[in-house]
């Protein structure tokens, strides 16, 4: 059983203290992730998941391979065999990514909290809570920072405490991406588009006889001390 309140507090502290240990590598990967921002924003618009969260998941699942599904890295143009299995085939990478976020565990498209705390929990859930149950930093998040030293699930249910994850973690990538793209920020929810307020039509003076009569009466009432 995972205590999500404690996991959230630990995650926020790790983020605050984390320092990049493979800066040149994470900056290089971040550069190509940010370069694909427009493609990730297409999926963001369909799911509500921030584009930069989608980007770091894409890197973790398939090293940003556009032929690999966001769900597990399997080719999206055929039925997936790895968990989640049985998905697809899809018409495009974007269609497969939307399916992964909307229809597959942990259903990130249903989440509304995209604060930093919500993002950290969402990323833990996307990879699974095996590391959280052991009380160790997940390399899925923290590899490439000083918050992670070693330990990796090398197969389903098989944890090797001495194995070092060669991939960069999502948090290392996010930190590098934020230095490249200052628009990346964490808020409780994605801000909806600002409503368009139609301009009020200009009012034309009422020049009708009744309108002029009302105007004259108002002026006379001011001078007679009857105006309210």
Image: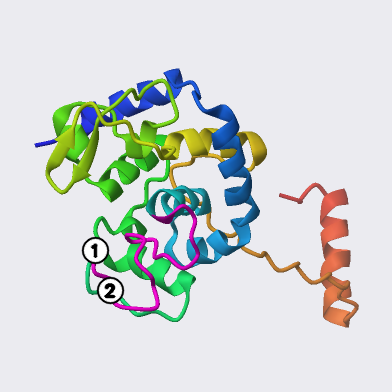
Left or right: residue 45 compared with residue 13: right
Q: Can you identify the residue that label 1 sits on?
A: 82
Q: Nearer the viewer, residue 105 or 69?
A: 69
Badge 1: how crowded within 10 Å, few (<14), some, or many (20+)? few
Dominant SS type (magenta):
loop
> Is residue 137 one of those drawn in magenta?
no
- Picture quarter containing residue 27? top right
For residue 178, say whether it is visible. Answer: yes
Q: Position of residue 79 (x, y in %)?
A: 29, 77
Left or right: residue 226 compared with residue 44: right
For residue 194, say whether it is visible. Answer: no
Q: Nearer the viewer, mark 1 or mark 2?
A: 1
Q: Can you identify the residue that label 2 sits on?
A: 87
Instruction: Name which residue lies at 14% across and 33% down.
Output: 133
- Picture quarter containing residue 141? top left
Q: Position of residue 63 (x, y in %)?
A: 46, 52
Q: Nearer the viewer, residue 2 or 77?
A: 77
């Amino acid at each position: 059983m995972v205590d999500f309140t404690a996991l959230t507090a630990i995650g926020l502290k790790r983020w605050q203290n984390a320092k990049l240990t493979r800066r040149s590598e994470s900056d290089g990967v971040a550069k190509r992730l940010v370069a694909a921002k427009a493609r990730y924003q297409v999926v963001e618009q369909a799911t509500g998941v921030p584009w930069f969260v989608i980007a770091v998941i894409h890197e973790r699942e398939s090293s940003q391979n556009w032929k690999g599904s966001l769900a597990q890295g399997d080719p999206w143009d055929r039925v997936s065999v790895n968990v989640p299995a049985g998905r697809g085939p899809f018409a495009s990478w974007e269609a497969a990514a939307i399916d992964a976020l909307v229809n597959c565990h942990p259903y990130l498209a249903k989440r509304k909290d995209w604060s930093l705390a919500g993002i950290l929990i969402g990323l833990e859930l996307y990879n699974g809570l095996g590391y959280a149950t052991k009380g160790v930093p997940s390399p899925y998040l923290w590899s490439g920072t000083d918050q992670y030293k070693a330990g990796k699930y090398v197969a389903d249910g098989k944890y090797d405490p001495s194995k070092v994850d060669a991939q960069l973690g999502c948090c290392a990538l996010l930190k590098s991406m934020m230095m490249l793209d200052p628009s990346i920020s964490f808020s409780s929810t994605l801000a909806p588009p600002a409503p368009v307020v139609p301009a009020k039509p200009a009012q034309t003076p009422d020049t009708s006889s009744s309108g002029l009569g009302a105007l004259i009466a108002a002026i006379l009432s001011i001078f007679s001390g009857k105006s309210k």
